Image (cartoon, helix red, strand yellow):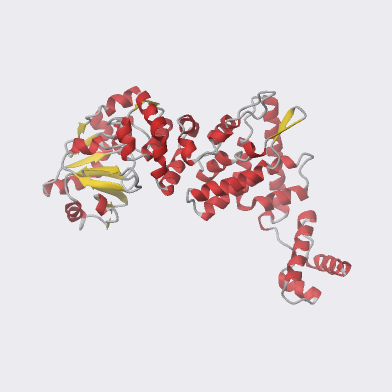
Amino acid sequence: MLPDRLQPLVEATTELSDRFRRAGHDLYLVGGSVRDAILSKPGTNAPDGEGDLDFTTPARPDQIEAVVVGWADAVWTQGKRFGTIGCRRRGRRFEITTHRADAYRPDSRKPEVAFGDGLEDDLARRDFTINAMALRLPELELIDPFDGLADLSARRLRTPLDPELSFNDDPLRMLRAARFIAKLDLEPDSDMVSAVRAGRGRLAIVSAERLRDELDKIVMVPTPSRALWFVVRTGLADEFLPELPALSLEQDPIHRHKDVLAHTFAVVDKTNPDRLLRLAALFHDVGKPRTRAFVDGGVTFHHHEVVGARMTRTRMQALHYSNEDVETVAELVSLHLRFHTYRLGWTDRAVRRYVRDAGPLLVRLNELTRCDCTTRNANKARALGRRMDELEARIEELRQKEELEAIRPDLDGEQVMAALGLSPGPDVGRALAYLLELRLEEGPLGESEATERLVAWWADRG
């Protein structure tokens, strides 16, 4: 049964394994491709040119490079000092790494690398048993010294070595554990959970970039909440995303309304697998703890979207997200309540302002708004859905009459200066702002009427 499942991998690796064999080196396929093929997960049978493949070998980096040069369409050696040579052949990427054992120094973010000759020693240093299986090529012999196959069958997540040693080698593995729990629907081994709780402080030596990349992967699994609950309950979130555990408050302790953290995770799960949208869902209520106020037997969170947007920027910048990512997510957080400010129906004026404020984020904002409704009250949920349907219908209706996505004043700067006899300066900007307000309030006016209204406004000023 196993060879049949792995046949696509055989076809993808035959040429490379033949070259290594002729050069006198053993070659093993390792990592996620082996695990996913055993699970028969979608993507395992990807056609030629799709999917990255990872290998390990006792050959040293110079020897690996010599084998692939002349065969690969491209070769890169940025990871050579860590034992990795990458290459591409017919659109497929291969990474071949010398057997190694790497470990973090207690006070360093950079791993120490030692090359080795034994496959089992290499597998022992991998993150989890389900990723510590190898296929000897080309024989297709499964090498599984740490019972990864049994763990897959039992849906169990364990480390090959003592978990404290494994997490000490690379503390990011504690966060990776959360992702695999959610991605593959696994139960974490109790010893591993204890090791995470005890060693979570080691996450401080992991670079912001690696933490960011792992968070991105977590939010993109089918059900991120499983990973996120693990991150919060083990204390990992306290080390790199403290805004999450801070949400473990009841919105209304008097009436025991829903927990903000549980609500947040539910919203993340409901959104489509769009990385920035899911990050916005994760951050959308982070401002609530700082804005909570008790009034007249109830609770309010006035302006939590404004505070939350500011907190989002600060946290994402600390995790070294790009400026574009930071602004996209923070703007979605800032706008996520905008829909609820229109309670008396969607006038043309309201629709124009909503579309202009959302700009290119309109589709994401509408989805975030829909997903933000996690009430168990079916009537309330249906009412919100109807209001969203009404808004989207009004947007489409107005889009047919106006260029909604390109709302701008009816006159440009040159026309304003000609109409008012102005030179470039602040007054031109103020005039354009006035015209934009007219456009938002009344729709397109046309050049003639816009000029007449502008001249009258200018005269009234003074």
Q: Residue 316: x and y, percent?
A: 52, 48
Task: Answer with the quarter of the image where residue 202 lies.
Answer: top left
Query: Residue, x 57% and y 30% (percent of image)?
Result: 248
Q: Residue 256: x and y, percent?
A: 66, 23
Residue 233, placed above or below residue 396:
above
Of residues 159 and 355, the one nearer the viewer is 159
The quadrant the N terminus occupies is: top left
Q: Residue 180: x and y, percent?
A: 39, 33
Of residues 318 and 422, the one nearer the viewer is 318
Task: Answer with the quarter of the image where residue 195 lies.
Answer: top left
Q: Is residue 363 visible?
A: no
Of residues 58 and 107, the one nearer the viewer is 107
Q: Is residue 389 left or right of residue 50?
A: right
Residue 256, placed above or below residue 35:
above
Q: Is residue 353 left or right of residue 329?
A: right
Q: Residue 290: x and y, percent?
A: 64, 39
In the picture as drawn, the residue positioned furthest to the front comes out as 107
Query: Residue, x 61% and y 38% (percent of image)?
Result: 285
How many labels were placed on the picture?
0
Q: Is residue 167 left or right of residue 239?
A: left
Q: Is residue 457 visible?
A: yes
Residue 372, placed above or below residue 424:
above
Query: Residue, x 67% and y 39% (percent of image)?
Result: 291
Residue 66, placed above or below residue 202:
below
The quadrant the C terminus occupies is: bottom right
Q: Is residue 354 left or right of residue 56?
A: right
